[in-house]
Amino acid sequence: MPVRLMGQFYRHAPRYGVGLVLLAAYQLFQWWFDTRMRSAINFATTGHSAQAIALGEMLVMAALGAFIVRVLSRVAIFNAGRIAEYELRREILERLLKLGPSFYRKMSTGEIMSRVTNDLVQVRLLLGFGILNIINTGFALVSALAVTIPISPKLTLASLLTLPFVLLITRGFSKHFYTRTRDNQDALGKMSARVLSSIAGMRVIRSFALEAEEIAAFEKTNQAYLEKSLALARLRGALGPILQATMSIGVLVVFWYGGLMMLHGELDAGGFLAFYRALGRLTWPLISLGFVVGLLQRGRAAFSRLTDIFSAEPDIVDGERLLPALASGALEVKHLCFAYNGRPVLDDVSFELPAGKSLAIVGRTGSGKSSLAVLLARLQPTPHGSVFLDGVDVCDLPLQTVRSSIGYAQQNAFLFSTTVARNIGFSIDEPDEPEAILRIEEAAREACIQDEVLDLPDGFDTVVGERGVQLSGGQKQRVALAAAFASEPKVLVLDDPLSAVDARTERAILAAIDRQRARRGLILITHRVSAAAHCDEIIVLEKGRIVERGTHEELSKNGGIYAIFSEEQRIESELAKLGGVIADEQRVAE
Amino acid sequence: MTTPLGSESGTPKPTREQRGRAEKTRTERILKAFHEEERFGKAYDARLTKRLWGYLKPYRSLLWFSLVVILITSVGAMVRPLIMRSAIDSVVKSGDRAALLRGGVLLASVLLVEQVLGLVQMYAVQVVGARAVTDLRREVFAFVQGLRLGFFDNQLVGRLVSRVTNDTDAILEMFASGALNAVGDLARLIGIVSLMLFLDWKLSLIAFAAVPPMGILIVYVRRNIREAFRAIRAKTSRMNATMNEQVTGMTLIQAFSRQAAAAQEFDESNTSYRDATMSAIKWDSIQDAAIDTVAAVCLALVIMSFGYRRVSFGTLVAFSAYLSQFFEPISQLAQRYTLLQGAMAGAERVFSLLDVVEPDAPPRAAKPARNPEFAVQLEDVNFSYKPGTPVLSGINLVARRGERIALVGPTGSGKTTITALLLRLYEADNGTVRVNGDDVNGLARGELRSRFAVVPQDVVLFPGTVASNVAASEEPNRERVEDVLRRIGALDLFAARERGIDTRVDEYGSNFSSGERQLIAFARALYRDAQILILDEATASVDSDTEARLQRALEELMRGRTALVIAHRLSTVQKADRILVLRKGSVVEQGSHAELMTQGGLYARLHELQFSRTEQETALKSALEHAPELAAGE
């Protein structure tokens, strides 16, 4: 588990090691080039042409050699940073996949995304750019000083007078640069959000003739972005000239003082040029060093924010016991109590679902029926000793076993922004195999969505858009239902699968659910009695407790809540019939 | 013009083993086509350039100033090695110490002036670019506001957003990175070449010999860098979208035990992102090292030639300085070319949107005003969204001033469409739509729509606060907002929040319940205080307390106004003066509640069922009173 920043470094030690050696080799080449260039120039100026030419040939080779090691050193270290980034991102996602509801209550999707994008970039910059520049600057200093000190220690000292200033300037810039870049991005984000809401709410804007207000509101964000981008531009524009001006002082010192030394014969022509060149190649390493300091700080802070994700402990973990190869799918709930944020939601709920039987859980909104549904498959932290699959406490079983045995279709269907086929075949490992395609089509037919899917522009290959925006609410719900059918669990838990469908479709889906019942156990969470009537047993939840249980016939007669529901249902079905007539007429009209 | 990049040319052969793979790439291709991939345009397009110039024109004085400064600084950069040469040569030849000092001071001054001017110039260009792009962005946004509503029906929201933001940003980036400096690069290149030729043409040839291979290398490397960065951008957004979606849909993934598949899916985008970045690293490193290397090689060659024939040491120093300056502009030019391409592609997309000719409610020939006592009148109106599928046929409808009309009918019967025609959000195919007797075709859209207050079925909240949403303005009149909320009986609900009516509205209003969102929409309509109210009742069920609030609010809202209510609750319908029952785009029944009840048609049947249902509700509630007490929560 890569929970420590240094751990990243150790893990890729070979790459960093190679990078270190290559950077050393590069600076060695540079040193060699500068010192031999000095001799070559001195040979040339003193008429030793043959030596000068021979050395010149070697200089060409050295330049090419330097090129190769320079490219390789960067590839080695930057790649190490990128690979570490890749691994960290993978680790984060794998951790996120394990974490349960208690974590997601604390950290929102936006917060997680901000850490995975912004913070991870900071860590990567530290592990790639940061490390490379620390090493390179060190070697570059050694290599440059090894050229300049033998030429003249005094000149070296004089030329490095501006060094502290350069460091101070870049350090200060780097700080502001970071905040201003962030401000700039925030301003862009705000502007985009404004445009998005404006286009998404265009109908309202038109109806209220709010165009002028919208344009004014947009203009505010537009101007804010302009200001932020100019603030960034001022900084970005100023850095180069200020640094160059500062560093040129050093260059001038060399020029003037070096020139004087040449005049006094203390410095030869080759030495002058070599000195000049050595100083020149210190420029970038020194500038980047100023940035690296800020980078180290930010990278470490960013890593500690990532650790919040790494170190989060999953609240729902695998059990050790194994079920016999084929679970039959008998489910038992014993004295289940559950509280959410200290508020009791379920109180002493017990029932049994023998393999292949069906159970309806009926209740009003807020009665706790959806909470019960998610506890069965341990999507919330199910208390020990309360839910049993084939006689084994689900908390003692591997999550994979529990969840592939107990399939759950949630009320508010969530779809992924891929094709309809992929959404239905979500649980299938090879969704593009011919058998899988048949299974997907079969599930779509069972969920009464096939005809509508085929009417979509690209049929099953239609991309549903982010969160399924291209589909209606009822269509989304049925695609989710088809996905639950296609997953073929031992026990199917359907949370209000009919809330957004018309009466005709409801009848067809109920028929499909009846067929499903022949193959697997079924728990149907619903407030519709017509649906509950299809089940072998019915329990009625009210304020977290089972207040009635029995068959449809029994409960309809006993004058309790269910009987009231039942009467309500009868009226609804009358209404539905009427609606059905209208819907039929509409279909004809279309 | 533009070619879609990144589309695989060869499809894998669908052998039995590869079938799964081939199918996978099929789904991937579908997704790829769905997500618009970034494209590069031509670097130069006279038509686009001319249009862009229109936005730069207001700032042209700054632009000319920059251009002059760029040329001056380029000259400065060219002269510096010459100063060094003459100073060194005079020192070497005559031992002139004063010349050295003079040279040093001159060099320093040139440098300083150059840097200061450079700073001013860079900023000036950025100001021009940023202001021009801000203007363009304002124009695009305002233009979109003036497009007819039908235009948005088949547009992807995300793409329109990126016209206003990303595409204009691509144009901005061109300025931010100093594209104008391309002129300076070119000038410097020409200057340096001439100066080198002037100093020593034979030495120059050595340097120039390096240009063709260097040029080829740079073009080649740049192309790879460009491709790599394009891939990185595309892959970053896909990767982040995948993660965002997985985190949002985590319950579903866990419920289906798809963690392994999800991890693998993410790993694919994570891996391809990593590979794209590693490719970029390779080419970037090569580019980074190439210039220094070529300059060093040239220097070595010059020194070798120095062995054959002597030149002055000053010339050598100047030459070595020019060599390091010489290759810089070549590389810069290549980089700027890429940016120019990106900017042109952005400009092309933005301008193609601006070229859309679908104005909202344009002026049309209007029939003379008639029947001003009718707040709303539709005469023989036909309408269809798509030709061939009529939505409304032969609609006749009248609402007298102050009258309350309920529109009843199944989904798709055309109720909402009628209200859209009144506002002229869509235009009737034929027939006449009148508001206060005026043909809507003859009214300015602002004037027409100011006569209405609308509560849509799906409440839309905008970024801002409760108050700004109620007032539908960034500068709400707070007293009036509070007054309006008080009148609909919702002030206590919002005042209870920490920041009261200044509570921020999250994205899509997710920090408010559906009942609260409806109340905000009601308040918005009341704040507007228009003569005619159009209300599309929400179907979503709310708790009984909120339901009661909504009913009271509705009553307040309709008081003293003409109201057209698309009703889903029969209780609302009963309050209407007149009820219109729609089916298949035609009015099938019309009259007061009493009249329709005696007719015994569709409405009467609907009402009968609803009434018995209400009785049952009451019975249920009393039954629940006796249920055991336990705090409910789900």
Image (spheres, rainbow, N blue to C red):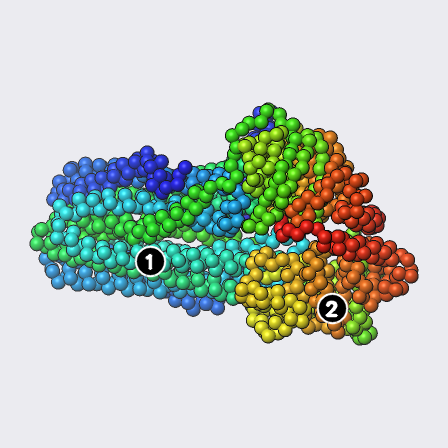
Mark 2 nearby-residue class (10 Å; few <14, some 14–19, many ≥20):
some
- The answer to which of B521 and B511 lies nearer the viewer is B511
Q: Nearer the viewer, mark 2 or mark 1?
A: 2
On the image, the x and y values in percent for residue B243 come to 52, 44
**Which disc number belongs to residue A173?**
1
- The answer to which of A420 and B171 lies nearer the viewer is A420
Q: Amino acid at mark 1?
A: Phe
| Left or right: B228, with B428 as reference point | left
Residue marked by disc 2: B555
Q: Establish if A503 lies above or below B49.
A: above
On the image, the x and y values in percent for residue B112 come to 26, 63
- The answer to which of B167 and B571 lies nearer the viewer is B571
Q: Residue at x 19, y 54 (%)?
A: A160
Q: Residue at x 58, y 34 (%)?
A: A394
Q: Chain of mark 2?
A: B
On the image, the x and y values in percent for residue B434 come to 78, 69
Camera sees residue A213:
no
Q: Residue at x 68, y 61 (%)?
A: B546
How many discs mark residues in the rendered view?
A: 2
| Left or right: A206, with A158 as reference point | right
**Which disc number belongs to residue A225?**
none
Q: Chain of mark 1?
A: A
Mark 1 nearby-residue class (10 Å; few <14, some 14–19, many ≥20):
some
Residue A357: image quadrant is: top right
Q: Amino acid at mark 2?
A: Glu
